[in-house]
Image (cartoon, grey):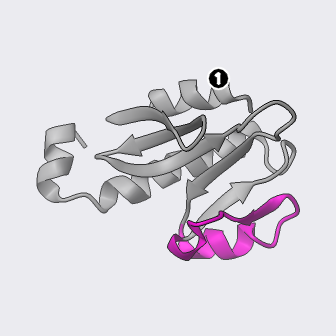
């Protein structure tokens, strides 16, 4: 999945916002809380996708080749796809959509109502 494809997919999820930060990372949020990141720090640098996941998914995914605990976010059960063939585009979309749902569920009832969630 390219960064443009990642951004288009995340943009299509409900009530999302986007910001480029941390040296050119594409950061996607719902209710001001991050659910997925696509980092591409410069020429020759491998693009990496990170997302929040459930505890079970975190355990299973970290055992897969090309997938590792996400730097700085692993304690919150985030994984990082470190190679472009670590996961199919279909699976990336499913996990990013689930990440969106996990983060949205942590928002207050009032926030979810304001965002139409």
- In the visual, does 49 lie left or right of 76? right
Q: Residue 58, located in which quarter of the rendered image?
A: bottom right
Please give the range of residues in magenta.
54-76
Residue nearer the viewer, 78 or 59: 78
The spot of residue 44 in percent (x, y) is: 87, 34
Q: Which residue is mark 1?
A: 4
Magenta region includes residue 72: yes
* Residue 115 in view, yes or no: yes
The quadrant of the picture occupied by the N terminus is top right
**What residue appears at the point 14 percent right and 45 percent down from the top-left corner?**
113
Q: Residues within 10 Å of mark 1 (few under 14, many from 20)?
A: few
**What residue appears at the point 81 percent right and 73 percent down from the top-left corner?**
63
The spot of residue 70 in percent (x, y) is: 65, 63
* Residue 93 in view, yes or no: no
Residue nearer the viewer, 17 or 71: 71
Residue 21 vertical position relative to residue 81 in the rendered view, above or below: above
Residue nearer the viewer, 48 or 8: 48
Q: Secondary structure at mark 1?
A: helix
The spot of residue 39 in percent (x, y) is: 66, 41
Magenta region includes residue 113: no
Residue 59 vertical position relative to residue 34 in the rendered view, above or below: below
- In the visual, does 83 lie left or right of 110? right
Number of marks present in the image shown: 1
Residue ranking furthest to the left: 110
């Amino acid at each position: 999945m390219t960064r443009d494809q990642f951004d288009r997919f995340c943009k299509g999820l409900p009530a999302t916002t986007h910001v480029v930060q941390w040296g050119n990372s594409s950061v996607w949020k719902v209710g001001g809380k991050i659910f997925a990141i696509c980092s591409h720090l410069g020429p020759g640098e491998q693009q990496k996708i990170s997302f929040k996941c459930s505890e079970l998914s975190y355990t299973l995914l970290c055992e897969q080749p090309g997938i590792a605990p996400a730097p700085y976010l692993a304690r919150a059960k985030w994984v990082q796809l470190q190679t472009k063939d670590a996961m199919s585009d279909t699976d990336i979309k499913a996990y990013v959509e689930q990440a969106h749902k996990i983060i949205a569920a942590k928002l207050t009832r009032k926030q979810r109502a304001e965002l139409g969630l």
